[in-house]
Amino acid sequence: MWNTTVQICLPGFTIVGYFLTASKLPQYGLIVGLVSEIFWGYASYRAWKAGQWGIAVTTVIVTMVFIYGIINYWVL
């Protein structure tokens, strides 16, 4: 059940986040993108256990970028 949810939500939230950013709504795209990182984190953990650590490194960096963007748009 959880794996199916991840497989649906991962691309769903990611695509909506990109779409919002491209539609000149980056502040909302960043929030949706950060939500997608929950699912990317799970997928990268599973890949890391299989010896593929590149997705985990990318997920951590992208998560930090989303957090910086949210601080930039919503806090500062």
Image (cartoon, helix red, strand yellow):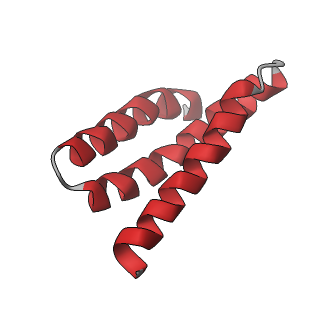
Q: Measuring 63% from the left and 45% from the top, which residue is drawn there?
A: 61
Quarter placement of the C terminus: bottom left
Q: Measuring 26% from the left and 47% from the top, which residue is drawn there?
A: 21
How many numbered marks does the figure carry? Answer: 0
x, y percent for residue 26? 28, 55
Q: Toward which corner of the image does residue 62 lie, by quadrant? A: top right
Name the one closer to the observer, 65 or 33: 65
Name the one closer to the observer, 30 or 43: 30
Residue situated furthest bottom in the rendering = 76
Residue 8 drawn above or below residue 27: above
x, y percent for residue 58? 64, 35
- 35 lies left or right of 41: left
Residue 38 drawn above or below residue 2: below
- 13 lies left or right of 66: left
Q: Measuring 41% from the left and 48% from the top, which residue is drawn there?
A: 33
x, y percent for residue 52? 77, 20
x, y percent for residue 54? 72, 26
Residue 45 drawn above or below residue 62: above
- 15 lies left or right of 67: left
- 35 lies left or right of 59: left
Q: Measuring 73% from the left and 34% from the top, which residue is drawn there?
A: 45
Quarter placement of the N terminus: top right
